[in-house]
Image (cartoon, helix red, strand yellow):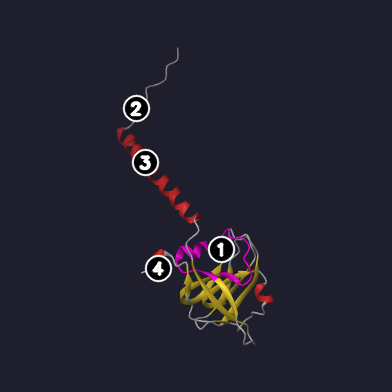
Amino acid sequence: MWRPAEVRVDPSLLARLQRLVVVLLILIPASAQAADELMQVPDYALAQIQLTPANSATPFNFSVKLAVTTSQHAHGLMFSPALPAKSGMLFLFEDMKPRTFWMKNTPIALDILFFDDSGKLVSLISNAKPNTLTLLHSRVAARYVLEIGGLEASRLNIKIGSRLHLPIVISDNEPQSRKK
């Protein structure tokens, strides 16, 4: 009759395995919570902005969500339904540098407008393809980035040299973290 050989387990190995299991039991819920936080839509402040097309004196009013924090920048317009005309998201950055965006989890085509620190439109990506990981570069330094519905810039004759009116004033729905 066959009998299994006696197995001896090193007590230090057993202690290390027990510590590993404890660490995993701690980390799994924490990583699930982090994933949930990424999927939650950030609380965006709202603003009314004005854009004046190049070679025009008549500005257009836009209603925008403001992306100010790192988490708001990262989420952007992911999972967003179609945008109404003259609406979008304005990304505010603290410095001037070339900007890179992508369309991950963004189911709508967008125009991406890059403005310098004076509010001048310096670069424009028209009708960015939805749900892609292709990196979209401003190629020049920008401080403000406006995302609007695909082809809307062309429809409104917004092109290089158009103006974003500054300063940006928050109108309502200010996140609690920014209230004093």
The answer to which quarter of the image holds residue 158 is bottom right
Q: Amino acid at mark 3?
A: Leu
Tell me which label, 2 or 3, sits earlier in the chain: 2
Which residue is under mark 4?
Answer: 178
What is the C-alpha distance between the residues marked 4 and 1? 21 Å
What is the C-alpha distance between the residues marked 2 and 4? 60 Å
Name the front one of labels 1 and 2. Answer: 1
Which residue is under mark 3?
Answer: 20
Is 83 included in the stretch rendered in magenta? yes
- Residue occupying image coordinates x 45% and y 15%: 2
Tell me which label, 4 or 1, sits earlier in the chain: 1
Which residue is under mark 2?
Answer: 8
Q: Amino acid at mark 2?
A: Arg
What is the C-alpha distance between the residues marked 3 and 1? 39 Å
Seen in the image, is 29 located left or right of residue 61? Answer: left
- x%, y% of residue 180? 36, 69
Name the one closer to the observer, 54 or 62: 62
How many numbered callouts? 4
